[in-house]
Image: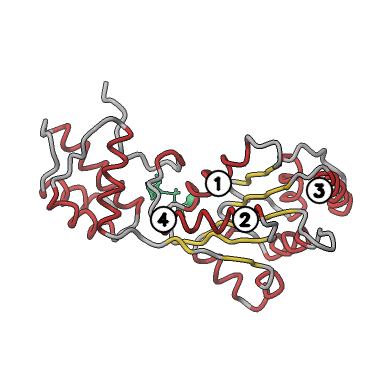
Amino acid sequence: MIKSTPFSISPNPANLYLTPSLKSTIFKIRYTIEQRRGLACLLGDVGMGKSSVLRLIHSEYTDSESFSSSMIQTPNFTSEFGLLKGICADLGLPPRNSLYNQEKELREFLFKQFESDKNTIVFIDESQRLSDKMLELVRTMLNLETNTTKLIQIILCGQLELQERLTGKKNKAIRSRVFMAPMLDGLTLAETKAMIEFRCEREGLVSPVPNDLYQPIYDLGRGIPREILKICDIAYALMLEYEESTFNLELIETAGKQIL
Ligand SMILES: Nc1ncnc2c1ncn2[C@@H]1O[C@H](COP(=O)(O)OP(=O)(O)OP(=O)(O)O)[C@@H](O)[C@H]1O
Ligand SMILES: [Mg+2]
């Protein structure tokens, strides 16, 4: 049996190496939630770590009595009513027979939460998939507020297409509601090395990458965490297959050719 390896590409938040830029992004989202600023967007290109960050933040609030939350991982609902029912179900609310009644159910819940000093958060991953009507629903949910504060905090997480959608004319109204929209950047060379070492440490291993070979891994992966991890994972498999104890340039180049 091959032992578990350090380079999994599933979005397990425990695998995240927190770069200064990630820490800053996480802080901004926590601020939006805890200061009840309503809406934040977490943006980034494919494979940058958005879902992992969203899960990390979500997990911080799930155990707290002071927060109720809904996590929509893939919003593949056929209508905005479906999305609202999904959110309400996560919050423990019953389904209602119309959008109007479902909104009423949510509104009553949010006011009760507020009276008992509780905050409510909705996380939506893959938000680039939300239809314009669904974005409009998000906007209406943000209208639920008292004179002084927002009753619901919404975190939309999505690829760059979400940014294009939000800057388009059609979605002007929701765009102006966005409090912050941090963008996840690619890793630097030093961060790539630190991330690989961090991943190995978690498995109780020393990094198999010789010091001079982080550069080609970084170049082939273009600083994108998922691409870097895929290269490392393939090179790791080849290393085990050839019974080597560290990576060499040939293994990395062979691995680089196998990713698309
Ligand atoms: N800073 C990091 N440290 C360690 N691993 C990371 C880091 N950033 C991303 N990863 C890893 O990269 C992989 C891809 O991350 P994730 O699935 O969160 O990306 P994503 O931005 O949601 O991608 P997509 O746009 O395709 O949904 C995951 O295995 C994740 O653990
Ligand atoms: Mg994702």
Mark 4 lies within 8 Å of ligand 1 (Cβ measured): yes
Q: Earlier in the sequence, mark 2 or mark 3?
A: 3
Amino acid type, residue under disc 2 in the picture = Ile
Tell me the number on the disc at residue 57: 1
| Element type where label 3 sits in the image | helix
Q: Which residue is mark 2?
A: 155
Q: Which residue is mark 3?
A: 114
Q: What residue is rendered at 44% in x and 52% in y? A: 49
Quarter of the N terminus within the rendering: top left
User: Is 73 above or below relative to 35?
Assistant: above
Q: Earlier in the sequence, mark 2 or mark 1?
A: 1
User: Is 11 above or below relative to 25?
Assistant: above
Determine which quarter of the picture holds residue 79: bottom right
Tell me the number on the disc at residue 48: 4
Q: CA distance from mark 1 to mark 4?
A: 16 Å
Q: Along the line of sight, which residue is nearer the eye, 118 or 213? A: 118
Tell me the number on the disc at residue 106: none
